[in-house]
Image (spheres, rainbow, N blue to C red):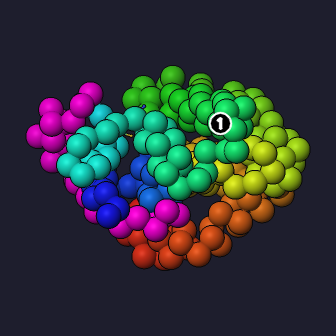
Amino acid sequence: MSPRYKLIYFPVKALSEPIRFLLSYGEAEFEDYRFESEQWPQLKPSTPFGKVPVLEIDGVQTHQSAAICRYLAKQFGLNGSNDWEALEIDAIVDTFGDFRQQIANYHYDQDEASKEKKWEPLKNETVPYYMSKFEEVVKKNDGYFVGGKLTWADLYFVGILDYLNFMVKEDLVENRPKLKALRENVLTIPAIKAWVEKRPHSEM
Ligand code: GSH
């Protein structure tokens, strides 16, 4: 029997969407529990380290979005063909994390003056630096991030892309044909397409 999954998160895509993509890809039924911000102070102490997403598996809480994705990827055959590919997947997913942190450092800055100062270097240095390298990696790997075939790195990237696009106020793959094709590829996987069609709307 397949496990009972309950994903706990704010009512947005952000860090949870890669998990939702993995669960959908694996055709696993899951409860997509979305709470409003006002409920968070009450919920926070019940989570392992005061953060979400939390994925409950048969009632047992797990946390850390990338660790959860990696675990699901192993169940669903998306963790590469060997330890080397698994390492490459981990490395690129950690790099998505580095990139996201730098974007978030701008987006969540509460001080308007300091935020404004971060905009130019983010747009003109950080974004082109990471995005052109991601484009190169996908070009070298025949349309995927690792090993010339679909892995959870691809689902992770496409899953988190709307959140990154929202924070950086552009479609990051618009002028990057390999990454654009990869997004198309992932979004046309029937189980992912079905999920995207039925998920609740959210901007980020
Ligand atoms: N490294 C963690 C992961 O990838 O799961 C980061 C989790 C995280 O920062 N979650 C944010 C959160 O719980 C939401 S995206 N914020 C509320 C808080 O810190 O009180």
Q: Tell me where residue 148 appears, x and y as whole percent.
A: 81, 51
- Asked whether 121 or 126 is in front, the reply is 126
- Asked whether 96 or 73 is in front, the reply is 73
Tell me the magenta residue range.
24-49
Q: Is residue 166 above or below residue 197?
A: above
- The residue positioned farthest toward the front in the image shown: 1
Q: Quadrant of ligand 1?
A: top left
Image quadrant for the N terminus? bottom left
Q: Residue at x 81, y 55 (%)?
A: 143
- Asked whether 142 or 200 is in front, the reply is 142
The reply to whether the magenta stretch includes residue 141 is no
Q: Tell me where residue 191 appears, x and y as whole percent.
A: 53, 72
Q: Which residue carries the number 1 mark?
A: 86
Quadrant in the picture for residue 149: bottom right
- The residue type indicated by label 1 comes to Ala
Q: Residue at x 69, y 38 (%)?
A: 82
Q: Is residue 55 above or below residue 178?
A: above
